[in-house]
Each structure stands twice: as C-alpha cells, then as structure tokens.
Image (cartoon, rainbow, N blue to C red):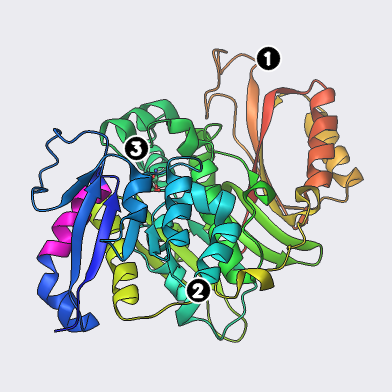
Amino acid sequence: MVAPLKVGVAGLGTVGAALVALVARQRAELAARCGRPIEIVAVCARSKAKNRGVDLKKFSWFSDPVKLARDPGIDVFVELIGGAGDPAKSAVEAALAAGKSVVTANKALLARHGTSLAARAEKHRVALNFEASVCGAIPIVKTLRQGLAGNSFSRIYGILNGTCNYILTRMEQEQLAFAACLKDAQRLGYAEANPAFDIEGHDTAQKLAILASLAFGTRVDQSAVYVEGISSIAPADLTAADELGYRVKLLGVAEKTATGIEQRVHPTMVRKDSAIARVMGVTNAVTLDTPGIDPITLVGPGAGGMATASAVVSDLADIARGLRSPPFGRPAAALAAGKKAPMQRHAGGYYIRLNALDRPGTFASIARHLAKEKISLESIVQHRRGERPHGGDDPKSPAAPAPVILITYATTEDGVRRALKAIQKTGLIAGKPQLIRIEKN
Ligand code: HSE
C-alpha cells in the first residue's frame, strides 16, 4: 500500500469539524480514488476542551498553528483559521517554506496576499489549493483553473454570498424589511460574525478578486473591486423590479471592457428568466461567459460545514493524486498587473427610483436633466399617490411624493450620477434617489 497523505488541520470550527467527519466517512472511497489513503494526523485550535462533536483523541494536538505547519509528521497543512493576517498568514508561509502543500478556505488571505503566496508555493514546488475559499461546494476554482483551461472569458458574475441572497429572497417573497431579514440570517447562523462584512459586499469582493485572477490571468487585487452592499435596498425596489420583469441580486461581476477589467460588487437587476435570477435563499451561483459557447452557470451551496469541507477534501484528493497546478492557473510571475476599468466609465442600463413631488412640471424637469446627459428611457412607471406609501407623510396629501421608477437604456455611470445630482438640486424630489445597475443576461 502506498503511504498515506498525512494532513494537519489548523482551525476546528464548523468547517474543521466537518472535515474530520468527512475524511473519516469517505476513507475507503478516497483511498480507492486517489491510490493512497488520506489521513488527518494532527489538529490545532485554541481550546482543547471544547466539544466539537467529533473524536479528536487519535490526533496529535497543537496549540500553535505555525508549529503544526512546520511539523515533519505532516505532508499537507490545511488552514481553516481565517483572516488576512497572522496567525493564518505566517502559518501558511511556514508550511510552504517547509515544503508542504497547503489547502486553505481563507478568502481574505488570498484576496490580499494570493499572488505572493502562489509565488512561494511555486518556488517550493508544492500545491496551494483554495477551492473552499469561494462558493463552498461549487467547484468554481477548479472549473476556471482546470476544467475550462482552454477557454477565455469575457465576463464572470455570480451570487457569491449566501447571506445577502437569503435576505433579498425573504424581502422579495414576504415583503419584509431589510433589518428583519438580517436578524433572521444571523439567528440561523448564515451571517459572518460581523454582518457588515456580508451585507456591505466585502465578502463578495474578496471572492470576486480570486475568481477574476483565475479568469483573466491577472494578479489578485481586492483593492480594484468597486463595492456597494445591499443595506439601501427597500421592499419597494423589489416590488418594482418584479413588475418590470427583474429580480435584485447582490452580484460580483468581473468583466473585460474597452477601458480595462471591471471588478464590481453591487445590487444588480437581473432578468427574472435568467439562470442567476432563479437562485434563491442561501444558494450561490456563478455564470461564466466564454466566447463561442453558451454561458455556463454553476449553482450550489456556498457555505456551511459540509459544503466547505467537501471543497477542502477535493483539494486534498488532488494532492494525494500528485496533481499540482499553478494556484491561479498560470505561473505567478506571468500574472498580469491588470488594467482597472474606472467605475465612472461603467456602461449599462440603470433602474432609478425617485420620490417625486406630485406637481405640474416635475416630470418635465426630471426628463430635461436626463436628456442633458443623453440618457434615454426604456420605461417609466409612476404610481398614484397613496398606491405606494412612503415615509411618515400622509400618502393622500397633495404635498406627499409619488414614486417614479425609470429604466434607462445603456448609458454611463458618471452621466447618471451627474443627472441625479442635478435632479436632487431642483428640490422636486424627496430624499435620496435609488440607483440600481441592470446587468445584461
Ligand atoms: N458569509 C458567507 C456567505 C459565508 O454568506 O456566503 C461563506 O463565505
């Protein structure tokens, strides 16, 4: 029998515990598929006493992840600690320097230091695998790195955060307010410890930065991602979207444009009949646009112990089989700097919701400012006062604003922003205009 692949696991949270259970459950299958057993031999966490629902007695115990990373008794170091800094970073670096392959679920670490860690892995001729860092059980990293190694990509976009999709789904289906849905997401354990990380789009941005590097052969650059979260989305937007044939999703989009590569995270209107619009609840999905073939959409669970552990095990299986690819699909030195497309130059359709004062001339003024920026309207919906109540005003009062929904044809971000600023200055609308980008799909 070929010697087992000996694995050390740092971090025994939900994913770590699920990994221990999964490796035990799939022991025979993995040995058969990989030609050698995969054995967890050592673990590391802060508290030894904590009950994690799995038997840890047979593993060596470490309290310092860097020590585990250097331990001669392991072949592979699995990093499930999280965070872009230490101890995760120093432990991963220590493992690579000691000539051990690394498997990590750490999107923050990769989004910040992915290129330099890839270079270290290549220098030491070991693997750096991170399938679990993006979209849990969906094999999107391997799809981009291996499965579609012969394709080029014009755009990739997806629902990369289950918490936001859960919130938007509940808001739409039950006409609930954002805050109530967020509370439920937290209660059910979907949201990160700091919910702002999910709802303000940063979790999606980190995952998008990793996918963009794999798709476009550029250095991972989280700072190039434009980020807007979902906290400003109101039930009124979801209702209006529905009436117009759209659904609102928080998307991460990476796209090749004439001005460079756009990487953007924001609430997005997608056509209700598109594959991505049908993805509801905590489920994740990624669509890949590759010239010459129809778009490919991968859908599945993006978070949770077993879903994430399944991705970790697939990475371990590759190592057990002796497979090693450059982490980002090409040698780190060959990853290009990537020209960042400025968000002001983004071109596309827009949804605009204004609370317009119901007076003669209001609409003419709005139309004039849009025309000045050469913005052409595809549809206009104005509800009667009182049909869609707003704020604390008496909706029947003549002074109360009436919601106006505008859908524009393709225009530019800076043009729309200029027009809305001018419209706000007229004093003919109440509050801030709502702006949601429309994604062609
Ligand atoms: N908070 C993340 C989500 C977990 O909601 O998708 C997985 O990264």
Q: Residue at x 39, y 42 (%)?
A: 163
- Label pair 2/1, CB-CB below 8 angstroms: no
Q: Earlier in the sequence, mark 3 or mark 1?
A: 3
Does the closest atom of ligand 1 sit within 8 Å of the Cβ of label 2?
A: no
Q: Nearer the viewer, residue 196 or 120?
A: 120
Q: For the point 77% across and 61% down, which residue is it? A: 339
Which amino acid type is marked by label 1? Ala
Identify the residue under disc 2. 144
Q: CA distance from mark 3 to mark 1?
A: 30 Å
* Distance between the alpha carbons at the discs numbered 3 and 2: 36 Å
Q: Which labelled disc corresponds to residue 399?
A: 1
Farthest residue in the right direction? Answer: 372
Asked if 58 appears above or below 405 in the picture, the reply is below
Asked if the stretch drawn in magenta spans residue 316, the answer is no
Residue 4 seen by the camera:
yes
Can you say whether 421 is above or below 304 in the image? Answer: above
Q: Which residues are magenta?
A: 15-24
Q: Position of residue 288 (x, y in %)?
A: 53, 71
Q: Are marks 3 and 2 in contact (CB under 8 Å)?
A: no
Q: Nearer the viewer, mark 3 or mark 1?
A: 3
Residue 432 percent location from the top left of the image: 68, 26
Residue at the spot of label 3: 174
The secondary element bearing badge 3 is classed as: helix
Q: For the residues carrying marks 3 and 2, which lies nearer the camera in this image?
A: 2
Horizontal side of residue 433 vs 230, given as left or right:
right
Image location of residue 437, percent across then percent down: 65, 49
